[in-house]
């Protein structure tokens, strides 16, 4: 029988989020890796009732979105920041934001 420390048990416990504060993250995708300087694209990803959804983030907004994720802001608030100024939105983003 293995006895674990109380601290280990607390660190491994799943953190439950308040409804509306979705589990979200920034995904980094590398372009053609054979190039000397491959391009990197960033996507904001979150779990929604429709499944996992992603929305492209401009490089200038990555740090701002990362701060919002760390601060555990609601997913819709982060999504509004991501799509601000975009010409074309994904169908799920359009439905969620009601545009």
Image (cartoon, rainbow, N blue to C red):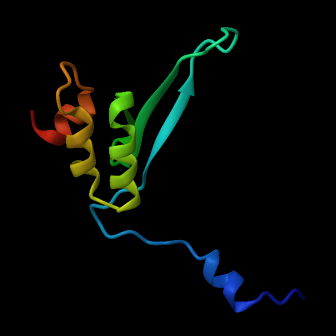
Give the farthest residue toward the left: 99
Q: Position of residue 46 (x, y in %)?
A: 39, 46
For the N terminus, the image quarter is: bottom right
* Left or right, 28 with reference to 36: left
Q: Which residue is drawn at 35% across and 62% down?
A: 71
Q: Position of residue 60 (x, y in %)?
A: 34, 31
Q: In the picture shown, does residue 80 fall above or below 16?
A: above
Q: In the picture shown, does residue 83 fall above or below 21?
A: above
Q: In this rendered view, identify the residue nearer to me: 82 or 15.
A: 82
Quarter-of-image position of residue 2? bottom right
For the C terminus, the image quarter is: top left
Numbered marks: total: 0
Q: In this rendered view, identify the residue nearer to me: 37 or 88.
A: 37
Quarter-of-image position of residue 96? top left
Q: In this rendered view, identify the residue nearer to me: 48 or 89.
A: 89
Q: In the picture shown, does residue 46 fall above or below 15?
A: above
* Left or right, 86 with reference to 72: left
Give the farthest residue toward the right: 1
């Amino acid at each position: 029988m293995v006895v674990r420390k109380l601290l280990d048990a607390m660190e491994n416990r799943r953190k439950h989020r308040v409804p509306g504060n979705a589990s979200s993250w920034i995904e980094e995708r590398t372009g053609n890796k054979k190039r000397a300087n491959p391009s990197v694209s960033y996507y904001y990803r979150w779990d929604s009732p429709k499944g996992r959804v992603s929305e492209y983030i401009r490089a200038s907004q990555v740090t701002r979105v990362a701060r919002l994720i760390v601060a555990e802001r609601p997913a819709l608030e982060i999504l509004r920041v991501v799509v601000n100024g975009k010409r074309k939105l994904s169908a799920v983003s359009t439905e969620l934001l009601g545009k």
